Image (spheres, helix red, strand yellow):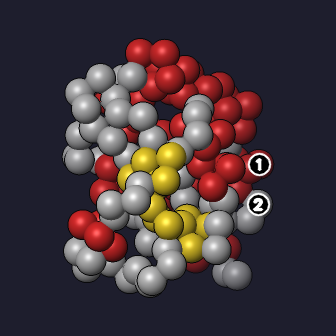
Amino acid sequence: MNVGVIAIVFAISGCESLYEAGVPGMTQFVDVESRRGEAEHFREQYVEDKSPAALRWLLRHEIRTGMTFDAVNHVLGHDGRPESDHRWITTKGGHYRRGDHVYKWSPDSEGNVPYLVFRDGMLVNFDPTEFEDQF
């Protein structure tokens, strides 16, 4: 890849954005240990205080399409529970299939409940930008 193209990409998106997108080699530009500490801080706030801001941060910065159910449970600090009445999610316009599984996690202190959809054990149709202004 051309050095000029790389410089433009860094200037436009920043190293943190490339790291969050999973671009290989970006860990050398990001303080991974600090990032882990930040994630742990927000996880504790969500688990202990049910902080809406902490839940939103975790969904925005730590959850990605393709993650396993166990990985999402780790990020959110507790296990999701199956949502049996999920037609309202799977019929509202996403690219869902019969057999997709919807799980919900504990509500935050304002009653916001994260619902996520999995197919074959992997998170599907997840857009972290949906959580910027949702709560």
Q: Residues within 10 Å of mark 2 (few under 14, many from 20)?
A: few
Residue 81, image x and y in percent? Answer: 50, 46
Q: Which residue lies furthest to the top in this view?
A: 49
Separation of residues labelled 1 and 2 (CA atoms): 6 Å
Q: How crowded is mark 1: few (under 14 residues within 10 Å), some or many (20 or more)?
A: few
Of the residues shown, which amino acid type is indicated by label 1? Gln
Q: Is mark 2 on a helix, strand or loop?
A: loop
Q: How many labels does the image show?
A: 2
- Marks 1/2 in contact by CB < 8 Å: the verdict is yes
Q: Mark 1 points at which residue?
A: 28
Residue at x 64% of width, y 74% of height? 120
Image mark for residue 25: 2
Residue 29, image x and y in percent? Answer: 69, 47
Image mark for residue 103: none
Quadrant of image for the C terminus: top left
Q: Residue furthest front?
A: 84
Q: In this view, does 34 lie to the left or right of 18?
A: right
Of the residues shown, which amino acid type is indicated by label 2? Gly
Say which quarter of the image contains residue 36: top right
Out of 133 and 97, give the one closest to the viewer.
97
